[in-house]
Image (cartoon, rainbow, N blue to C red):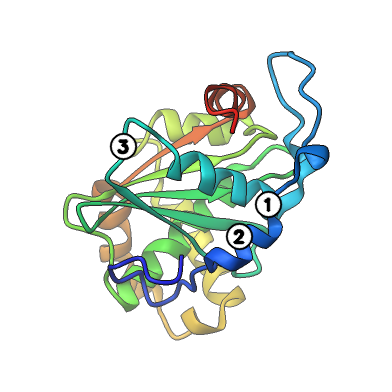
Amino acid sequence: MNDPGFQIPAFYDAVTSDEIAASDLTESERPLDTNGDTLSFTQLGGFRFEILAYHLLSGDPLNPKTKVVLVKSSGDQGRDVLVYTGGSLQTIVQCKNLSTALTKPQILRELVKLVLNDIKTPFIPEKGVNYEIWAPGGLFEPAEQLLAGWPEQLLDEDVRTAFDTVTTDYEKLKHLTWEESNERLLLTLRTKIKPWRQLNLDLARRVRNYPD
């Protein structure tokens, strides 16, 4: 989407419509549906799964007024799809088409990175955002418990561990300190971020509802 008509967050870079079209699957390339409960999403790889997510969200007839933006990967084995309603960011979808289940630390690192970027350049609306993790490979039990019990299951010490990892790994976030960031980071996570997950069964149903 070259011109979404609204401002996307500064740390994101949108994938163009030409790039999306160039990577769309032909009929002969689509993985075979054996009519089981699940689908073999891993055959798509990372980028094509992300494009699938973009198309599913763009083609939702229940939300015809939404605007959907696919943004480029930041090298973390995942890519976001942003969903806007009425010009306001409503949902962030993190695509994790991995062969193994996601861990609790992996999820926390993604969420902490998101909020730290918001601390640098605010973009999360006051009403908060839905944060969907599309993970066909599933989640390990501690990750499931974290999401099911959010935000009560969110522990300060776990957020601190994720903070230390993220600020070490990402050059643009290295200047942030825990002492200066922790209050806003914890408050935003607990009051503005509404996380949940879409697993293989959920995603298989969505694909079959929109076969095009």
Which label was assigned to residue 24?
A: 1
Tell me the amino acid under the disc marked 1: Asp
C-alpha distance separating marks 2 and 3:
21 Å
Residue 3 % position (x, y):
38, 71
Residue 82 % position (x, y):
41, 55
Choose between 43 and 200: the one closer to the eye: 43
Label 2 CA crowd tier, 10 Å (few <14, some 14–19, many 20+): some
In the image: residue 98, left or right of residue 145: right
Tell me the amino acid under the disc marked 3: Asn
In the rendered image, the vertical position of residue 44 relative to residue 198, given as above or below: below
C-alpha distance separating marks 2 and 1:
6 Å
In the rendered image, the vertical position of residue 75 relative to residue 197, given as above or below: below
Looking at the image, do the residues carrying marks 2 and 1 touch, with CB atoms under 8 Å apart? yes
Q: Which residue is mark 3?
A: 63
Examine the rendering and report whether any part of residue 99 can be seen.
no
Tell me the amino acid under the disc marked 2: Ile
Quarter occupied by the C terminus: top right
Q: Which residue is mark 2?
A: 20
In the image: residue 137, left or right of residue 145: right
